[in-house]
Amino acid sequence: MQLERFLEEVEASFDGDPQVSDPSDPAFAELTRTVNGYTSANELAVLNAAARALPEDECYLEVGSYKGRSICGAVRSVPDRTFYVLENYLEFGMQGQEARAELEHNLATHAAHADVRLIEGNCFSLLRRPGLLDRPVGVYFYDGEHTATSHYLALGIIEPWLADEAVVLVDDATYPMVTDAHDAYIARHPQWRVERRWDARTNDDPRWANGLHALSFRRDAATARGSEEPWDVRWRRLGYRTVLGPGQKAAWTAIHRFPGLVPLAKRLYPSKEASSIEASDRS
Ligand SMILES: C[S@@+](CC[C@H](N)C(=O)[O-])C[C@H]1O[C@@H](n2cnc3c(N)ncnc32)[C@H](O)[C@@H]1O
């Protein structure tokens, strides 16, 4: 996937500077009204621009679908590309069943024309599974859990799957913990760059939600296919598998069983998770 193609598509999708303009296609704003979720119309237009620029022999991969707003935006008028979605429903507790039904309904309504392959599970485990995806990832959209370790790992774990040139879109990137995580990753991995930062001016900014950053990856000899997993990714992955992942799972289960913990959780988590906690509390 050529970064330049993506940037051209972004430019063509807005009437002016994307930071301060609406997408030219009003369908993205309409999607934010009809499909529950967290991504803004501008973010949807950027995801869609990435999907439009994707070569046929590469795929688009999203982590974190929730009820499908972002994937419905990405696939709009893109009938002939392959889209994978990884989702574990962790953050939504028992409501996961409901979220899944709504996701399926939304896909049937807004994405029936597209080849969308939903895989259920934790992305950090799934992406260690050989053969999970049938082609290299040209576009990767990460909108999963937001801890510093998850965001660092979100880049590390995808690297072997990426096409030789790829675009990586990171949601909620205005949160300092997210920006710090990708800046720390890039400092150790010179094949990566931040190409565009569409930052939010406020929490849940109507135009950019909590910010979207576009990163590029270009494979070189140090990241040749079949290279060993770098140590900085390996120790975080092991830490996630043994401590952080089980801890998060226990925390979400506890929040669901003991709603009295909700105010504490809202203080500890950034605002998008807080909305999920509130939604879980109401279920
Ligand atoms: C903020 S929501 C995604 C919002 C969605 N993209 C939209 O447009 O509305 C984050 C989602 O990521 C999922 N998630 C979090 N951590 C995950 C992980 N490790 N693997 C897979 N899915 C994960 C959560 O269950 C949740 O549905």
Image (tube, rainbow, N blue to C red):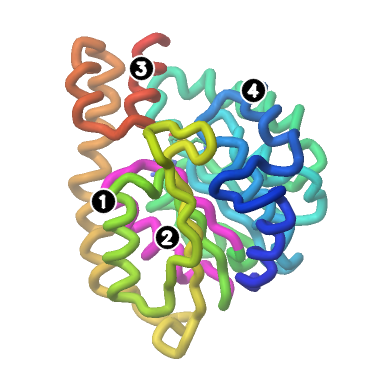
Pair 2/3: label in front: 3
Kind of element beneath mark 3: helix
Residue, disc 2: 128
Kind of element beneath mark 4: helix
| Measured Cα–Cα span from mark 2 to mark 4 | 36 Å
Label for residue 33?
4
Region rendered in magenta: 139-163
Q: Amino acid at mark 1?
A: Ala
Q: In the rendered structure, does residue 260 fall within the stretch colored magenta?
A: no
Kind of element beneath mark 2: loop
Q: Considering depth in this image, is 222 or 250 the residue closer to the camera?
A: 222
Is 38 placed left or right of 51 in the picture?
left
| Sequence-earlier tag: 3 or 1 | 1
State the image quarter where residue 51 is shown: bottom right
Location of ligand 1 given as a quarter of the image: top left
Residue, disc 3: 278
Pair 4/1: label in front: 4
| Sequence-earlier tag: 4 or 1 | 4
Q: Is residue 171 visible?
A: no
Q: Amino acid at mark 3?
A: Glu
Q: Amino acid at mark 4?
A: Arg
x then y, percent, for residue 226: 45, 81
Pointers 2 and 3 in contact (C-beta within 8 Å)? no
| Sequence-earlier tag: 2 or 1 | 2
Q: Amino acid at mark 2?
A: Arg
Residue, disc 1: 148
Q: Quadrant of the C terminus?
A: top left
The residue shown at (33%, 55%) is 179
The residue shown at (46%, 56%) is 197
| Measured Cα–Cα span from mark 4 to mark 1 | 31 Å
Pointers 3 and 1 in contact (C-beta within 8 Å)? no
